[in-house]
Structures are given as structure tokens and as C-alpha cells.
Image (cartoon, helix red, strand yellow):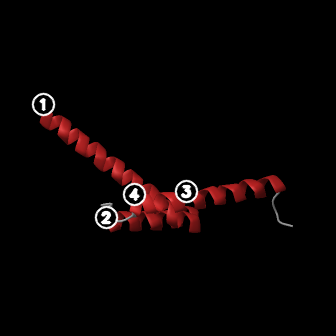
């Protein structure tokens, strides 16, 4: 018997399961070979995730910051290409 109700235990378990599955799918795609995400970005994401969410955040934080970095770089490259086309 724990301190929480059955519903909160089930919701927590589902959350942990989904976060683990998302990490298993996204990390190889985003941090695999050929991806040009600098290691300081991955390190800051891992440390920030660890500080914010604990052990799960260690992995999810690195993935989220890498995705944000890739989106930012794509936006910057699109803006530069659009500016040069004018």
C-alpha cells in the first residue's frame, strides 16, 4: 500500500511508460550519427532535465533541447535563404 490512490498510481505508471517509450524512439532519431547537434546542447539538456524532472528528465531534457536546437537552426536557415532571395 502506498500513499496515493489507485488512480494516481495508474496515471503515474502510464506517464512513466510513455516517457520511456518516447525516449527510446526519439533519442536514436535525433541524437544518432549524422545529426549535427553540438554536445554542449545535449549536456545542458541532460543536466537541465535532471534538475527539473529527475531521472526521466535526464533523457527527455536532452531530446527536447536537441529538437528545439534543430528547429531553431532550420528557422534561421530558412530566414537567411529567404533574405538572400530578395
Residue at 59% x, 61% y: name it.
Answer: 20
Observer-side mark, 3 or 2, equals 3
Locate residue 63, reporting x and y percent. Answer: 45, 59
Q: Residues within 10 Å of mark 4 (few under 14, many from 20)?
A: many
Task: Name the one closer to the observer, 4 or 83.
Answer: 83
> Could you tell me how far apart the alpha carbons at marks 4 and 2 are, in whole angstroms?
9 Å
- Residue bearing the label numbered 2: 38
The reply to whether the C-beta atoms of the residues labelled 4 and 1 are less than 8 Å apart is: no
> Could you tell me how far apart the alpha carbons at marks 1 and 2 are, in whole angstroms?
31 Å
Residue at 29% x, 43% y: name it.
Answer: 75
- Residue bearing the label numbered 3: 22
Task: Name the one closer to the observer, 29 or 52.
Answer: 29
Q: Quadrant of residue 76?
A: top left
> Could you tell me how far apart the alpha carbons at marks 3 and 2 are, in whole angstroms?
21 Å
Locate residue 12, reporting x and y percent. Answer: 71, 57
- Residue bearing the label numbered 1: 86
Q: Quadrant of the C terminus?
A: top left
> Could you tell me how far apart the alpha carbons at marks 3 and 4 are, in whole angstroms?
14 Å
> Could you tell me how far apart the alpha carbons at marks 4 and 1 are, in whole angstroms?
31 Å
Task: Name the one closer to the observer, 20 or 57.
Answer: 20
Amino acid at each position: 500500500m502506498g500513499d496515493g490512490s489507485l488512480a494516481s498510481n495508474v496515471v503515474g505508471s502510464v506517464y512513466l511508460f510513455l516517457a520511456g517509450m518516447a525516449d527510446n524512439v526519439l533519442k536514436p532519431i535525433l541524437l544518432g550519427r549524422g545529426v549535427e547537434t553540438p554536445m554542449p546542447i545535449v549536456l545542458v539538456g541532460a543536466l537541465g532535465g535532471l534538475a527539473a524532472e529527475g531521472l526521466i528528465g535526464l533523457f527527455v531534457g536532452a531530446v527536447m533541447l536537441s529538437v528545439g536546437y534543430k528547429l531553431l537552426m532550420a528557422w534561421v536557415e530558412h530566414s537567411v535563404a529567404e533574405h538572400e532571395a530578395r
